[in-house]
Amino acid sequence: MYPYNRKTQLYHVPIRAKERTDTTPDLSADRRLQELLVLAGQGAEQLTQKYTALLQEEALAEAHDIIKTMETDGKKHQRILREVLFIIFSDTAEDLPTEMPETETETAGGAALLEELLLTELDDIPFYRSLLSAMEEDDLWDLLFEIITDKQNHTAALNHLYAKYFTKTTGQ
């Protein structure tokens, strides 16, 4: 009935996987990319720790499920970045030196921590987009797009939580 439900293709064209050509860059030789991926993994771990600290805030008790989802996404991002490291370099983040600076999540209040998380998530989006532009493999694109999409969703949720719990309303 509707034209978009009909098969309009006269013959079946099999989809072929991209073949590696001589012009395709060898990502495994790029040590800067490796360092950036390790740095991204460290950043994801720090964000997860901050979300864990945010779960302890009594002012945000009603938003526990939202924050817990973002914490779980942070753990997923760590796993994805380890997977990307393995795909490109055949090693994991555990094989690489990782020195993370201590974070001061305990001293920050709920509003300050929420604002810091919002700004960090906003800053991470262009970082992951630049990582994405360095890669040509579809599998890696899908993994990084998943992280970017999560980060965009996190910024919307954090913005909502900040507006709901920490903005002062004026009486009308």
Image (cartoon, rainbow, N blue to C red):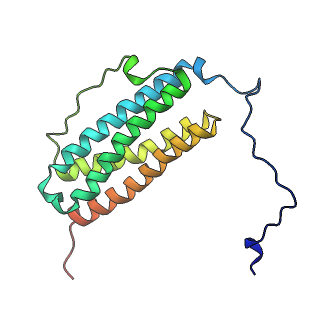
77 lies left or right of 161 = right
Relative placement, left or right, of 141 versus 127 is right
State the image quarter where residue 95 is shown: top left
Q: In which quadrant of the rendered image does the N terminus lie?
A: bottom right
Q: Residue furthest front?
A: 12
* 63 in relation to 137, above or below: below
Residue at (50% x, 43% y) in the render: 126
Q: Nearer the viewer, residue 138 or 101?
A: 138
Quarter holding the C terminus is bottom left
Q: x, y percentage for residue 19?
A: 74, 32
Number of residue marks: 0
Quadrant location of residue 137?
Answer: top right
The residue positioned 50% from the left and 40% from the top of the image is 128
User: Residue 58 falls in which quadrant of the image?
Assistant: bottom left
Point out residue 42 in the picture as x, y percentages from the top left corner: 35, 30
In the image, is residue 60 above or below residue 101? below
Q: Position of residue 7 (x, y in %)?
A: 79, 67
Q: Residue furthest left?
A: 58
Measured as percent of width and height from the top left, residue 71 is found at 29, 46
| In this rendering, position of residue 115 left or right of residue 6 | left
Q: Is residue 58 visible?
A: yes
Q: Can you say whether 86 is above or below 168 in the image?
A: above
Residue 96 visible? The answer is no
**Outermost residue to the right:** 10
Residue occupying the point 23% across, 28% down = 102
**Foreground pick, 15 / 124:** 15
